[in-house]
Amino acid sequence: MKRYRVRPDDHVNLDDFDPRDDSAMPGDKDETLAESAKLQTKLDALQEMLFAEHKHKLLIVLQGMDTSGKDGATRFLMGGFNSQGVHIVSFKKPTDVELDHDYLWRVHAHAPGRGEIAIFNRSHYEDVLVVRVHELVPEDEWKKRYEQIRAFEELLTSTGTTILKFFLHISKDEQRERLQARIDDPEKRWKFAHGDVEERKLWSDYRKAYEDALSKTSTKEAPWYVVPSDRKWVRNFVIGSIVAETLEGLGMQYPQPVIEDTVIE
Ligand code: AMP
Ligand code: MG
């Protein structure tokens, strides 16, 4: 799964990443789906141990263009996690109160505590993405944010948080199909937002903003992964594998409380 990782000094060009790439899958679609189901079982056990040990904290950041599958990836992960101990946060347009504070204020409040996993569906990265593309703050202000975000994430990682950041990479053609499906399919229509069609017109601006964010904020401790996301089963397998590998790497153990001569009558 290392192939998807952005190294700290990489200069990301998204043309180098194929959104349809399935070369690292364990087999065809059905075989990969079967492996993904096993991954969910593994994730369940790992998350239970994280919760029981009450030591590590895991932050999962999901970013990507509209329809890239942030909700779907969250659903996949939640299929493997017990909702106790996992906290999903969807970051929307900031409220007036949030705008009266610095942009990290609302984010920090949702950072995971010991034994917890937080999944961010959008995140503080919107503050260098949508904010940059729509010029919601002056350039000299958003330009400082890459360094601020690195410092913020460094604060979290140096105090026991593991951070994984996933960019769900879809092609522009795939987005057209998914937006069209939201119009055509009565069960998907509730997800359709006219704003998404307007945002699509800014595709190349977003792409540039993403390339900069990925290049400037992928660190050893808080890496970005570019996830091929045109195929949902690939996306889920890649994300699930990286989360499972990362949790396994923490060397977690169940706590061993002393049970002295306890007799249960
Ligand atoms: P959705 O993910 O479809 O629920 O949409 C959430 C919307 O909130 C998206 O259009 C985001 O761009 C927007 N949003 C999230 N964070 C920010 C932010 N910090 N500033 C402005 N808009 C934001
Ligand atoms: Mg939307």
Image: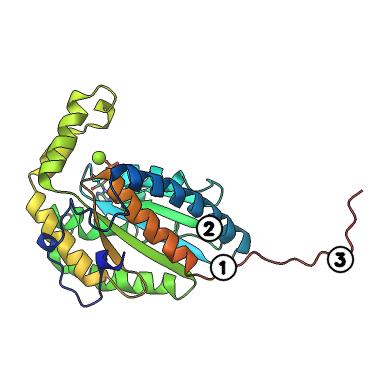
Q: Which residue in the protein does label 2 denote?
A: 46
Is the C-beta of the residue carrying label 1 under 8 Å from the nearest atom of ligand 1? no
The residue wearing badge 1 is 252
Q: List x then y, in percent, for residue 146.
A: 24, 70
Q: Depth check: give the residue in front, 34 or 247.
A: 34
Circle 3: residue type: Glu
Cβ–Cβ below 8 Å for labels 2 and 1? yes
Residue name at image x 36 percent, y 50 percent: 97
How many residues crowd around disc 3 within 10 Å: few (fewer than 14), some, or many (20 or more)?
Answer: few
Indicate the secondary structure of the residue bearing disc 1: loop
Spatial separation of the CA atoms under disc 3 and disc 2: 28 Å
Q: How far apart are marks 2 and 1 (CA)?
A: 8 Å
The residue under label 3 is 260
Q: Sequence-wise, which precedes: disc 3 or disc 1?
A: 1
Secondary element at image label 2: helix
Tell me, for residue 71, which label it has, or none.
none
Side of 240 relative to 206 (left or right): right
Q: What residue lies at 38% left-to-right and 58% top-to-bottom?
A: 241
